[in-house]
Image: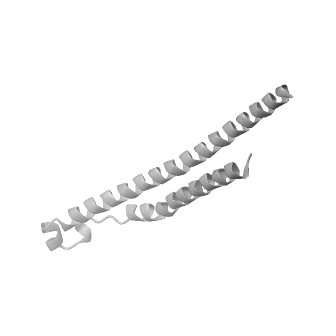
Amino acid sequence: MSDVVLKALDALQTDAGLWLRAADNVQAPQSAIGGLTLTGHDVSMWAVDRGLDRTYENGRVVLEDMLRQAITAFNGLGDSLLAAADTYAREEAANLHAMNRLTGEIR
């Protein structure tokens, strides 16, 4: 494979690694948010009367879900880039093999 192709494959794999690490980095905050629940018993009666416990919990659930979606998206991006690099490498190798076979037949 040419240097250009090898550099392109390396760039794809490097970018994939960045996305996969980003997903890993989001997992800890996503897990932590799961344990930060509040109920009416955890806040004052005044806060319960004004719905602060429900507002907090709704926001916590939305943020937890957004982080879960980010993890899924980041892993999807990383996996797609790795798959693209693998496909490109296989196709390049097959094309190189075909070219070598053709040049051998021409000689």
Viewer-proximal residue, 84 or 8?
8
Drawn side of residue 18 relative to residue 48, left or right: right
**Residue drawn 60% across and 52% down?**
12
Residue 37, position in %: x, y?
A: 32, 64
> In the visual, does 49 lie left or right of 97?
left
Q: Position of residue 66 (x, y in %)?
A: 36, 56
Task: Count numbered badges in the picture.
Answer: 0
Q: Based on the displayed image, in which of its 4 quarters is residue 46 positioned? A: bottom left
For residue 33, side relative to residue 97 (left or right): left
Q: Identify the residue at image location x=24%, y=68%.
A: 41
Q: What x and y, as percent, mark residue 101?
A: 80, 29
Return the residue nearer the eye: 88 or 20: 88
Residue furthest right in the image: 107
Q: Is residue 45 above or below residue 96?
A: below
Query: Which quarter of the rendered picture does the C terminus lie within?
Result: top right
- In the visual, does 36 lie left or right of 20? left
